[in-house]
Amino acid sequence: MTPDVEHLLRTEAPQVLGALVRRFGHFDAAEDAVQEALLVASRAWPTDGVPENPRSWLIRIGYRRMVDLLRTDQARRRRERHAGISELAMQDPARRARPALETDDSLTILLLCCHPALSPTSQVALTLRAVGGLTTTEIAHAYGTAENTMGARISRAKQQLARAGARFTPPTDADRDSRMNAVMQVLYLIFNEGYTASTGDELARVDLTREAIRLTRMLRDCLPDDAEVTGLLALMLLTESRRAARTDGDELVPLEEQDRTRWDPELIREGTELIDSVWRRREVGPYQLQAAIAAVHAAAASPDRTDWPQIAALYLGLERLSPTAPVRLSRVVAVAHAYGPARGLALLDDLNRGYHLDEEPLTRQRERAVRAHLLEMTGDTAGAAARYREASALTQNQVEQRYLQRRARRLG
């Protein structure tokens, strides 16, 4: 399948799903029907060519699959009759295409997939499948789980939506405000998993970072005036701009050692322009602050020209808005670079006493890596080597593991 066809299918997936859910009212069956339609298209279009109206083509295939699914269940057949669904719905092109062509369902589908009844893991999986158009196999591979395990998780998520009475309706202002944080968090999680994979022999999953950026662009198209959505997109672009320089062969290269000529100038330009466009509004949120931090890094031509005091100040503001363990640990790094490793270690010890960063699941591995780096900077090579080994044992990413082990060996 060519990249153009793959991009088209993923772009049309939420629109086709929206048309089917609006007409039939069954999210779980409609999502299965969309996946089958995407599969049929992925096989047919590369050889037969993309049809003149690809969305209507996909909806027609999805309609046929939906009718088949509904007819296997008596209760669903009654609903089908009650909703007035008939063969005419498939045979009349105007009626078939109108809902998808007149309505952009992207935001509604995202909100539905990020329903508060679902766990964050289920929200991510369902978003990747229903909105991103990824197969269960692709999602399972991205998260290092078996296909049947991921399939069961997605199935449970759809059942939870049904039990929660989730409806395919446009969000009200109140609904949107309460659910938008979940949507952005899901997209942020997808990007982070792609940028540094939790397991496997590759540092990054480029397919996931690209998908997260694509979906966030789609979200911003729906909400162009939302400063935090713009900030999230800027953050992803600025972070992704460093991807090519993060590895040398199969070895990890830390930020301060990266060849900055390999950073992507177009992504930096776009990301910087985006954050600048909303920063002036003084409506600062967590994603905007993170994007601003990434922009400061991107503006430095070399590591020694990085404005670390500004980054430390931005992290302090971010910690006040989002007092999480990863943010606190990132502030330690910024403080150490701005004011010296001894001050960074003192702050790390203080935060461990108050918030136990060394025990938090999200930071216990990185806390040891950060401590090792700071100890190395102070000249405590034995202590640094021990912490590098501890950090290595706590990660399942083989690229990161090799990097930490190499640092430990170098120090003895």
Image: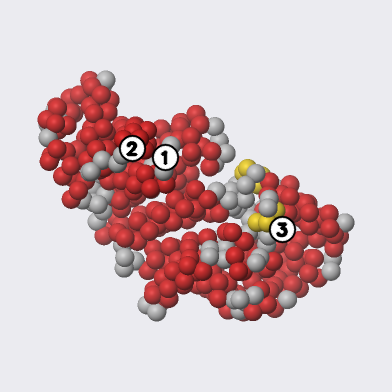
Q: Which residue is mark 3?
A: 369
Q: Residues within 10 Å of mark 3 (few under 14, many from 20)?
A: many
Q: Quadrant of the N terminus?
A: top left
Q: Amino acid at mark 3?
A: Ala
Position of residue 181 in the picture relative to residue 75 (left or right):
right
Q: Label 1 to label 2, Cα distance in Å?
A: 8 Å
**Considering only order in the chain, which callout, 2 or 1, is on the residue closer to the N terminus?**
1
Q: Please say if the residues under marks 3 and 2 sit with CB atoms less than 8 Å apart.
A: no
Q: Nearer the viewer, residue 263 or 170?
A: 263
Corner quadrant of residue 383:
bottom right
x, y percentage for residue 324?
55, 61
Q: Which residue is mark 1?
A: 1
**Considering only order in the chain, which callout, 2 or 3, is on the residue closer to the N terminus?**
2
Position of residue 242 in the picture relative to residue 154 (left or right):
right
- Residue displayed at 23% across by 22% down: 71
Q: Please say if the residues under marks 1 and 2 sit with CB atoms less than 8 Å apart.
A: yes
Q: Which residue is mark 2?
A: 45
The relative height of residue 253 versus residue 141 in the rendered view (above or below) is below
**Considering only order in the chain, which callout, 3 or 1, is on the residue closer to the N terminus?**
1
Q: Amino acid at mark 2?
A: Trp
